[in-house]
Image (cartoon, rainbow, N blue to C red):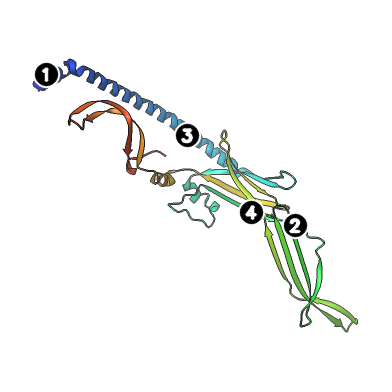
Amino acid sequence: MITILKNIGKFITDPKNTRMIMLGVIVIILLLFLNQCNRTQHFKNQVELEKQETQRITNNYEAAMDTIEQGQLDDNTWRAEKLGYELTLDELEGKYADLLGDFKVEKNKPPKVVINTIYEIKEVLTEVPVFVEVDSFGNTSLAFSDSTYHDSLMTNYRFLSGRIPYKIVFDQVDSTYKVVPDVGAFDLTLGMNLNLGLFKDKNTRKISIMADTDYPGVTFTSIEGASIMDDPANKKILRQMRKPWGLGLNLGYGAVVDVKNGKVSTGPYFGIGLSYSPKFLQWGK
């Protein structure tokens, strides 16, 4: 034991090793300093995450109490707006499962945004031309057709057509002719441009859902939506998408091998290198 201590003392006091030892001490101090900075930043991040979580819960409560605001942006566009939610995947599959509807969460396809809308269209049709048609068998019917485009791009339109068969029957009671309609057939086609967007305020972190349309007479009776956070359930999926190979800067203390003469020397190093990090050793977002 005494011999070992003497050898260690000689190694430390040898002027040839002093520089290497000093460099090693500097590297160790630097690593300790970086570790302390990392711990301090970690605690700061934890405090910030707790503040964000409190704000998220408050915003979700306001979204649950919010009502739809509807108005006309210009001569052609109507907008409906309502606060939305910011949810974890567990919350979406639990308390807010109705937002998913018939969709199912797949492991390799975590949802990022979910929006549900319900609306009604009220339109009054006037001055629709009606014609009398007679087929080859002498059957008569009232036929009508009406087409309307609500914008120059022809993305908002209505096509309406129909036919009501009828017969003219003589009523012997009052000696008059009466029109007796039969069962009618109608065809209605609607084309409506609907733009949906989910936006997040950088300051308040509130989620807003906006729905715009150029189709007149549209009233939104329900708008619900959510932005889905990267919680542990889908962070795992994101980690699987990472690449194990990377190129970056390297700083450390270790052994360097001289390929030409086969000598091994120790000391600090700095450079650019290729690194390999297996997925099971990766952490963070």
Name the foreground residue: 144 vs 33.
144
Query: Where residue 207 appears, x then y in whole percent?
Result: 58, 41
Disc 3 residue type?
Answer: Glu
Numbered circle sitting on residue 210: none
* Point 32% across, 34% down: residue: 273
Name the foreground residue: 71 vs 273.
273
Disc nearer the start of the sequence (2/1)? 1
Q: CA distance from mark 1 to mark 3?
A: 54 Å
Judge whether 91 appears above or below 249 on screen: below
The answer to whether residue 161 is seen in the rendering is yes
Q: Relative to residue 5, is residue 240 drawn left or right?
A: right
Disc nearer the start of the sequence (4/1)? 1
Number of residues whose C-alpha sits closer than 10 Å to that of mark 1, classed few (under 14), some (14–19) or many (20 or more)? few
The residue that mark 3 highlights is: 50
Tell me whether the residue at label 4 lies in contact with that at label 3, contact meaning CB atoms closer than 8 angstroms.
Answer: no
The residue that mark 4 highlights is: 118
The residue that mark 1 highlights is: 6
Q: Relative to residue 277, is residue 220 drawn left or right?
A: right
* Point 49% across, 47% down: residue: 91
Judge whether 51 appears above or below 139 on screen: above
Q: Relative to residue 39, is residue 50 drawn left or right?
A: right
Residue 173 found in image quarter: bottom right
Disc 1 residue type?
Answer: Lys
Q: CA distance from mark 2 to mark 1?
A: 100 Å
Query: Where residue 232 appears, x then y in whole percent?
Result: 42, 44
